[in-house]
């Protein structure tokens, strides 16, 4: 989480991500390649979700389609 914070707070990509989120047209007019920023944002998001899933599987010992189902009454 510290690395994600540092990426978003201090890097050029983080600055571009914040500008694109605030106003995509203005960011594009300022020279930010918004399509690339959006693609990299989805890539980072997907990688973090994959990491979270792998961590969950390692912690639970098994992983299946119903691994996170909650049984009523438990």
Image (cartoon, rainbow, N blue to C red):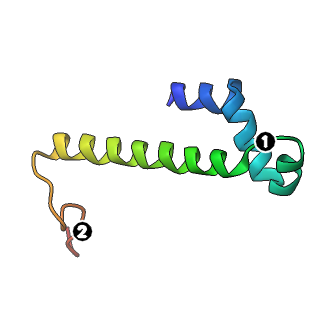
Please identify the residue farthest to the bottom as the structure is shown.
72
The secondary structure type at the circle numbered 1 is loop
Task: Classify residue 9 by image quadrant.
Answer: top right
Report the residue at 64% width, 46% height from top. Answer: 36
Q: Relative to residue 17, is residue 40 drawn left or right? A: left
From this view, report whether residue 70 is shown above or below residue 40: below
- Residue 70, disc: 2
Tell me how far mark 2 sits from mark 1, CA to CA: 44 Å
Q: Looking at the picture, how far across and down is residue 71, in whole percent?
A: 20, 72
Q: Relative to residue 42, is residue 66 drawn left or right? A: left
Label 2 packing within 10 angstroms: few (<14), some (14-19), many (20+): few
Comparing 55 with 45, the one in front is 45
Q: How many marks?
A: 2
Report the residue at 10% width, 45% height from top. Answer: 61
Which quadrant of the rendered structure holds the C terminus?
bottom left
Comparing 28 with 55, the one in front is 28
């Amino acid at each position: 989480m510290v690395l994600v914070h540092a990426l978003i707070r201090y890097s050029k990509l983080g600055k571009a991500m914040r500008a694109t989120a605030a106003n995509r047209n203005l960011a594009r007019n300022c020279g930010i390649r918004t399509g690339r920023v959006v693609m990299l944002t989805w890539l980072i998001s997907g990688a973090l979700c994959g990491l979270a899933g792998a961590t969950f599987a390692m912690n639970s010992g098994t992983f299946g389609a119903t691994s996170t189902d909650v049984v009523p009454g438990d």
